Image (spheres, grey):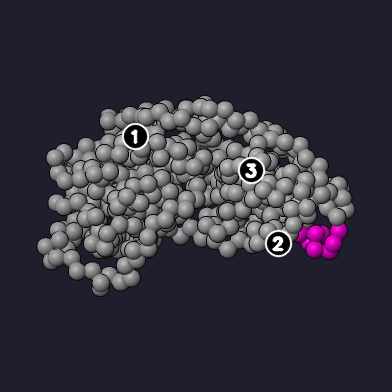
Amino acid sequence: MQFCYCGISNNKIDNVNECQLSAELKQEIHSYEAVANKIIEEIVHGKFKGHTYDMLAKFIDKFGPRLTGTQNLEDSIDYMVELSKNLSLSNVYTEQVTVPAWKRGPASLRISSPINREIPVMAIGLSNGGKVTAEAVVVASFQELEALSDDQIKNKIVVYNPAFTSYGETVKYRSRGASVAAAKGASAALVRSVTQKSIRSIHTGMQTYLPNTNKIPVGTISLEDADMLHRIHKRGEKIVLELDIDTSLSEGTSRNTFVDLSGSQPNISRPIVVVSGHIDSWDIGDGAMDDGGGVMVSLAALHFMKELSLTAKRTVRAIFWTAEEQGLLGAEAHVKSHKEEEDLLSFAMESDMGTFAPRGLDFSGSHEAGCIIQEILQLLSPINATEFKTPLDGGPDITFWAQNGVPASSLLNANEEYFWYHHSVGDSMLVEDPHNLDLCAAVWTVVSYVVADLNMPLPR
C-alpha cells in the first residue's frame, strides 16, 4: 500500500438514522437477502470454502515479491490473465504502463564511533546510491531539524527517529525526509522504519525527491537501531556512520489487468462496478498482505458470481493495478487515458489495507450513495461486516475516481497489526487466514453484485 494524500472531503454520515431512503429502494435492497445468504453460505461454509486462500497461496508461492519493473511481476500478471481465463472469465485484457525499473543493490551501515558495529540497513524505494562516511545528527521531527542551522547539518547524515502516531503522519519522514535533509546540506539520510512494532525488522517503501534538492542516498533502519542512535546522540557523544547504498534506475513497462464479468443490460445507467487490488509489491516480502489478498478477493468475487450463475445488470470489472507502490502509477495512467470512463462507473472498490476479519466498508461519495451502501451492508449481518465509515481510507488507486465524485469504498477489516508486517519480510502467507479470506471474499461478492444489479446507479 502506497499512502496517498488524496484530499477527499470528509462527507461523514454519522448515523444510519440520518438516511431517508425511499421504502421502494429499501425493499429492493432487502430483496437480495436470500441471494446474499447463499453467497455467504457457499463461500464461507460451502463449496468455495478455502478457495480464495488456495488461489492466493499458489500465487504467492510461485512468484513471491513482485517489484515494479521486474520480469517476475510481468510473469505474475501473465499468470493472473491465464488463471482468470481458466476460471471461465473470458473477457480479460491488459493495458501497458510506463514505470520506473528501480533495482536494490547491496547496502551496509556501520557505526564506527563511539562504538563499532554493523547496523542492518535497506535502501528506501527510488533512492539514489552513494557511499558516505560522516557524523550523524539524530532528530525526532522535521521541526527539530528545522531548528538546527544549516552549518550544523552540512555534510552530515540526518537520522530521523519519529514516534509512530499514524501511518499518514509518520510516513512523511520516509516519503520526503531525504529532500528535507538535503535542503539543509545533509549528505545522506536514514529513517526509522514506519511501524509500531519490531523484532529488529526493517520496512521499506517509496520516497520522492523534491525539486531543486540534491538526490542524496536514503535508507531505513529498525526501531531498535534508530532508538539506539538517538540515545547515544542525546548523551552528547559524537556518532560517525559509514553508509554504502547501491541502487540503479531505468525505465520499464508494466500492465494493468482487467477482467470483466459482463452485465445483462449494457445500456443501463452507469454500467460498470469495479473491484480491485494492486498486483505489484515491494521486493523484500512476498506481498501476500500488500496486496495479493486484495487481488485475489477481487478475482474471487467474479469467479463466485460466475459459478453461482449470478449475472448482474451491470458489468463487474476486476482490476489488478500495477506500480501502486511507486506512486499509484498504473491507476493514474488508466484514469488519464480513460477520462470518459468515469461517467460509466456506478461504484469503485479497492482492498489494499489487509484481508483480515472484515468489518464492513469505508466510503466516499454523495450522502445518498452512502446511505445505499449502509443499507446493503445490512445484508452482511450474518458475518458481522456491517460497519460503515467515511471518508475513504485505504483505497489509494481508486482515489483518482473518488476525487472526481465516483462513489468509492475500501475494505474495513481488523487490520490493527497491518503495519507490523507492511513493506517488510514479514509480509507472507503466515499473515493470511483462510477463514478471513473467505469472509472478505463474501463481502466483496455480495456488495459488488448487489450494487451492480440495482435498478439505479449510486447517485453522485
**Mark 1 to mark 2 CA distance (whole Å):** 45 Å
Is residue 232 rendered magenta in the image? yes
**Who comes first in sequence, dot 3 or dot 2?**
2
Amino acid type of the residue that numbered disc 3 sits on in the rendered structure = Thr
Residue named by callout 2: 147
- 74 shown above or below 176: above
Relative depth, front residue between 15 and 3: 3
Which mark is first along the chain, 3 or 1?
A: 3
Amino acid type for the residue under numbered disc 1: Ser
Which residue is labeled 1 in the image? 337
- Left/right placement of residue 152 relative to residue 25 reads right
Q: CA distance from mark 3 to mark 2?
A: 19 Å
Highlighted magenta segment, given as a residue range: 230-237
Q: Tell which of 62 and 122 is nearer to you.
A: 122
Give me the disc on residue 52.
none
Q: Which one is earlier in the sequence, the residue at label 1 or at label 2? A: 2
Give the vertical position of 255 relative to 407 (above or below): above
Q: Determine the secondary structure under disc 2.
A: helix
